[in-house]
Image: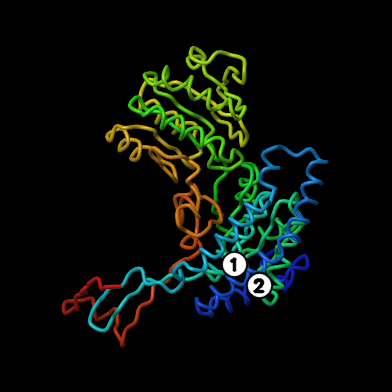
Amino acid sequence: MLAGMSETTNGHDFKALRKAALNLSLMGDDERSSMLMRMADGLDAARERIFEANRADIAEAEKKGLSDALMHRLVLNESKLSGALDSVRAVAKLPCPVGRVVEKRLLDEGLVLEKRTYPIGVIGMVFEARPDALIQIVSLAIKSANGIVLKGGSEASRTNETLVDIIRQTLGGAPFMMLLSSHRDVDTMLSMEGDVDLIIPRGSNSFVRYCMEHTHIPVMGHADGICCVYVDESADIETAVRVATDSKVQYPAACNAVETVLVHEKAASAFLPRFKKALDEYSVLIHADERTLEYIPLGNNVVKATEEDFHTEYLSMQLAIKIVSSLDEAIRHIAAHSSHHTDAIITQDERSKAVFFNSVDSADVFANCSTRFADGFRFGLGAEVGISTSKLHARGPVGLDGLTTTKWLLDGNGQRVSDYSGPDARHFIHEDLPL
């Protein structure tokens, strides 16, 4: 169905949502920040109600035999909820992203050009079974003055409905927010060109591609999180073991968890046995290539790797290991197998670090630290709607700036283009002005 054919579609009034988004954008930043603080307090006071709904979702998921990775994402416990509420309050305290002048230029006397940030409008957010993501998404939408259409994974339906109900009660109905429930609603949202301005899907590779192929609305996000850690020949072995282990086990179901560890052949004998010992504490299954098996033999959580293993996002306590002969081979492997999400090098050599930084074409490229740092909250963005591997608009963790667009504003006093052409044409000054 095309936008504008009906005021309501499947019971959802997208026109009213757009109007509410406009009203949100006309509020002052202090008012929107106050809304976020009230939202955090309201959710905080309703913890037990939220946990009760989440327990019901978990019980249903267990009956259906959902994967461990999905179960990890579904759980909303004290720690996750506290972290989500901390991020809401952090977002509230961030500078206003709307109306910020990013360029200012004097074209000629009395002709001033400005480029300012503005809300995108209405954002359609489809996310996996992570109810804490809903809290972060709504907080960023409010702060950036965007309307938000939410479609969470059906596995978390009770938790999501409870969260949205509490937010609505706290914020006077929150008419700028819409929660969709059925899979059919996703197709409806994808068809709402003109009423929805941006789609951000978070889920499986196939689902993200489905969204891209079934809408004319711009889509921002990433399909896979196949992240690599490369242990260089100059790496400090203790650092390499510590960082690579954290990248896998700290939260294996996350899209920024490492899935492949590449090891320089000169570091293999020192690194691999110690890394294997560290992973054994968490019963991590290793998919090892032929050369790796020379240092950590088959059996005891070690299997022989196939080529497909290096294209796999495990999202669980599994990873693939490959020995490479050079930094260049590691970079080539990442180019061929990585999903351009987050890749890291462990090295003490500044030249190797510089080459890695310049050559690896990923949204996040790290040195000597865990891939798990690829996160909007950890980046100081307050929160994130996701991580984008796109090269347009926003890349990496997408926070407030990624939810704004810009306008060019030209303020004159009667100037004509014809005055700037011909033999007696005026000349532009083109002087950049302080912001």
Earlier-in-chain disc, 1 versus 2: 2
The residue under label 1 is 122
Left or right position of 367 against 220: left
Q: Which residue type carries mark 2?
A: Leu
Q: Residue furthest left?
A: 424
Q: Determine the residue positioned at 61% across, 33% down.
A: 314
Q: Quarter of the image containing the C terminus?
A: bottom left
Front position in the image: 421 or 342: 342
Q: Which residue is painted at 57% across and 22% down in the image?
A: 287
For the residues labelled 1 and 2, say whether their Cβ atoms are less than 8 Å apart: yes
Badge 2: residue crowd in 10 Å (few <14, some 14–19, many ≥20): many
Crowd around label 1: few <14 · some 14–19 · many ≥20 (10 Å): many
Is label 2 in a helix, a strand or a loop? helix
From the image, tell me which residue sits under label 2: 17
Q: How is the image coloured?
A: rainbow
218 or 341, which lies in front?
341
* Whether residue 212 is situated above or below residue 22 in the rendered picture: above
Q: Nearer the viewer, residue 323 or 429?
A: 323
Location of the N terminus (image quadrant) = bottom right
Q: Is residue 346 above or below residue 303?
A: below
The location of residue 238, given as percent across then percent down, is 41, 29
Q: In the displayed structure, does residue 370 sit left or right of residue 250?
A: left
Write the residue at 71% across / 56% down: 187
Residue ranking furthest to the bottom: 413
Distance, label 1 to label 2, CA atoms, is 8 Å
The answer to whether residue 17 is left or right of residue 309 is: right
User: What percent of the width, then of the height, locates residue 31?
Assistant: 54, 78
Up the image or down, 306 lies above or below 133; here it is above
Along the line of sight, which residue is nearer the eye, 49 or 406? Answer: 49
SS type, badge 1: strand
In the picture, residue 369 is in which quadrant? top left
